[in-house]
Amino acid sequence: MLVAGVLTGIMIVSILRNGEINWTVVGATFILSLYLFLSLLFIRRELKNK
């Protein structure tokens, strides 16, 4: 969750600096944070099962 927060912060700063939304960056950040979130959920579930 910390990584996703940092990525979101970087995205917001870049949007403010550029003045427009770069949809490629937004999409990549969203997919990355979603992937991290799902992998964290999966890892936690695997640890509980053991």
Image (spheres, rainbow, N blue to C red):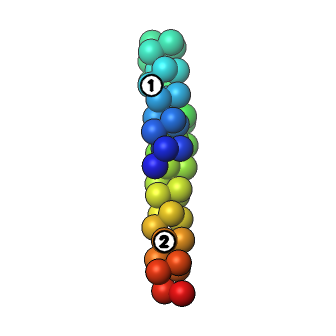
Residue found 47% across the figure and 58% down from its top: 37
The residue nearer to you, when weighing 18 against 6, is 6
Report the number of numbered marks. 2
Disc 1, SS: helix
Please give the residue where the numbered disc 2 appears in the rendered image: 44
Q: Is residue 18 above or below residue 2?
A: above
Decide if residue 42 is in sight here: no
Residue found 52% across the figure and 58% down from its top: 35
Q: Amino acid at mark 2?
A: Arg
Residue found 50% across the figure and 12% down from its top: 17
Q: Is residue 43 above or below residue 14?
A: below
User: Which quadrant holds the C terminus?
Assistant: bottom right
The residue nearer to you, when weighing 45 against 12, is 45
For the residue carrying disc 1, how many other residues have a C-alpha within 10 Å: few (<14), some (14-19), or many (20+)?
some
Q: Position of residue 21 (x, y in %)?
A: 44, 24
Residue furthest to the bottom in view is 50
Q: Amino acid at mark 1?
A: Ile
Please give the residue where the numbered disc 1 appears in the rendered image: 12
Q: Comparing marks 1 and 2, which lies closer to the viewer?
A: 2
The residue nearer to you, when weighing 41 against 25, is 41
Q: Position of residue 27 (x, y in %)?
A: 49, 42
Q: CA distance from mark 1 to mark 2?
A: 29 Å
Q: Position of residue 44 (x, y in %)?
A: 48, 71
* Disc on res. 35: none
Tell me whether circle 1 and circle 2 mark residues in contact (CB < 8 Å). Answer: no
Of the residues under marks 1 and 2, which one precedes in the sequence?
1
Decide if residue 6 is in sight here: yes
Q: Is residue 16 above or below residue 24?
A: above
Residue found 44% across the figure and 25% down from its top: 12
For the residue carrying disc 2, how many other residues have a C-alpha within 10 Å: few (<14), some (14-19), or many (20+)?
few
